[in-house]
Amino acid sequence: MKKRCLAVLLMALCLLTGCASLLEREYSTAEPHSSKFWESEATDTLRAENYQDIVNDLLILIGQHVDQATLRLYNFKDDLTVADTLERATVEIQQETPLGAYAVEYITSSAQAQRSYYEVTLQIGYRRTAEQLQAVVNATSPEAVSSLLESALEAGRTELAVRIGYWGEDGREKVESAIRQLREERELEETPMWVVNYYPTQGPVGLLEFLLDPPEMPVVEGLESQETDLTAEEEALPEEAPETPDKEN
């Protein structure tokens, strides 16, 4: 009886001290993907209740390089409102968002009224491949461009796309200065100048594209010979005689 009491006492002391950790277990729960933007995971249909939801839905689709999708619009009163909202959203995506300006060629949509929502069929055309979108790197500011360009050159890459978190008023100057310094350090002054594209083109820049091996300008066949022939013809023309004043009678 004494041994049993001693065992119980030791177990109690163990639980009150460090031995309690031996009995601890970690539990984790996994929940399926959920977002207010997704209407149905089975059909990849998204939902929107206002203008900003539509813009966010489009950015989600573009980020995944989806070319066809369905939106369900709630709280839109009539066909005209839906059409106007979709038009404004697609224009904003292509002209004002960095990702849309960089990647999207066009967006088309058609809406059909349902009992409690509008069902919109979307088609998105891209100027960039899914691999190019996946290769976009993030940077907090233009100051990081130099190291990113150096890493891209060492890896033998011919292009680099950088999403910029903060763009100041002197962002372009900093980027151009970083390019000049890096080309001087690597003795690349005699090579073709790199091409830098800014997205969007108006307003604060959010994404930079560097073409480190820009294609040469195509030579139009026959253009050079035409210019040569034209020059020869001009040289062969006789000089016009200077005009002489009429003699008075």
Image (cartoon, grey):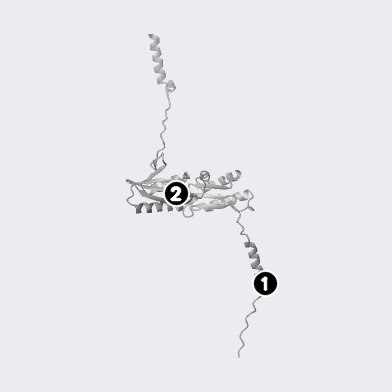
Q: If the image is split into quadrants, where does the N terminus sit?
A: top left
Relative image position of residue 76 (x, y in whole percent): 34, 49
**Residue type of the residue flagged with mark 1:** Ala
> Of the residues under marks 1 and 2, which one precedes in the sequence?
2
- Residue nearer the viewer, 207 or 71: 71
Q: Is residue 85 left or right of residue 100?
A: left
Q: Is residue 24 left or right of residue 173?
A: left
Task: Give the residue at mark 1.
Answer: 236
Relative image position of residue 52 (x, y in whole percent): 39, 48
Identify the residue shown where x is 39% and y is 15%: 9
Q: CA distance from mark 1 to mark 2?
A: 59 Å
Task: Give the residue at mark 2.
Answer: 123
Furthest-bottom residue in view?
249
**Residue type of the residue flagged with mark 2:** Gln
In the image, residue 9 above or below residue 232: above
Res 45 visible:
yes
SS for callout 1: helix
Res 167 visible:
no
- Residue nearer the viewer, 170 or 155: 155
